[in-house]
Image (cartoon, grey):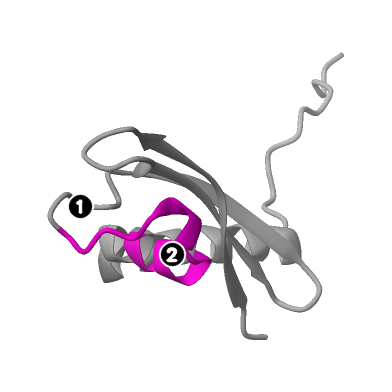
Amino acid sequence: MAITYTWTINSMYTMPTPEPDFVVDITWTLTGTDGTNTASISGDTQKAQVEGDTFTPYADLTEAQVLSWVQDDLGENGIANYQANVDGQINSIVNPPVGPTVEPLPWS
C-alpha cells in the first residue's frame, strides 16, 4: 500500500533582527501512514528565512510558506531520506525484524 506523508510545523524560533520576529529556526515532523500503520520523524531547520529575501512579517506567515523553506533547505535528497526513514519504520511494524533469542544451554 502507498504511504501518504504529512508535514507539520511544530515551532519556530525568531530573532529581533534584521526584522522583528525574523525566523531563524523551525522544528517540524514528517508523518507517514499506509492507512493502517503510522510512523514519524522530527527534524530541525535552521536559518530558514534568508536575510535579503522578501520579508514576510511573522503574523502573515503561512504553514505552506514555512514548509517550503524547510523542504527547500532539505532538497530532494533530504526529503527522500526522511521519507525512507518513515517507510522503514512502517515496514518494521508490518514485518517486525527477527532478533536472536537466548536459549538454555543444551548441557544444563
Q: Report whether 67 appears left or right of 19.
A: right
Residue reaching furthest to the left:
52
Q: Position of residue 19 (x, y in %)?
A: 27, 43
- Dot 1 lies on which element? loop
From the viewer's perspective, is the residue at label 1 or at label 2 nearer? 1
**Does 79 appear in magenta?**
no
Point out which mark residue 67 bears. 2
State which tag comes first along the sequence, 1 or 2: 1
Q: Which residue: 20% across, 52% down? A: 50
- Dot 2 lies on which element? helix
Name the residue tied to disc 1: 50
Asked where in the image residue 90 lies, by quadrant, the reply is: bottom right
**Does 54 appear in magenta?**
yes
Asked where in the image residue 102 lies, by quadrant, the reply is: top right
Q: Can residue 24 be seen in this view?
A: no
Task: Give the residues drawn in magenta, as a range.
Answer: 53-69
Q: What residue type is labelled 2?
A: Leu
Q: Can residue 82 be seen in this view?
A: yes
Mark 1 → mark 2, Cα distance in angstroms: 14 Å
Q: Report whether 81 appears left or right of 33.
A: left
Point out which mark residue 90 bears. none
Quarter of the picture containing the C terminus is top right
Quarter of the picture containing the N terminus is bottom right
Q: Where is residue 77 in the image (x, y as percent from the top left)?
A: 28, 66
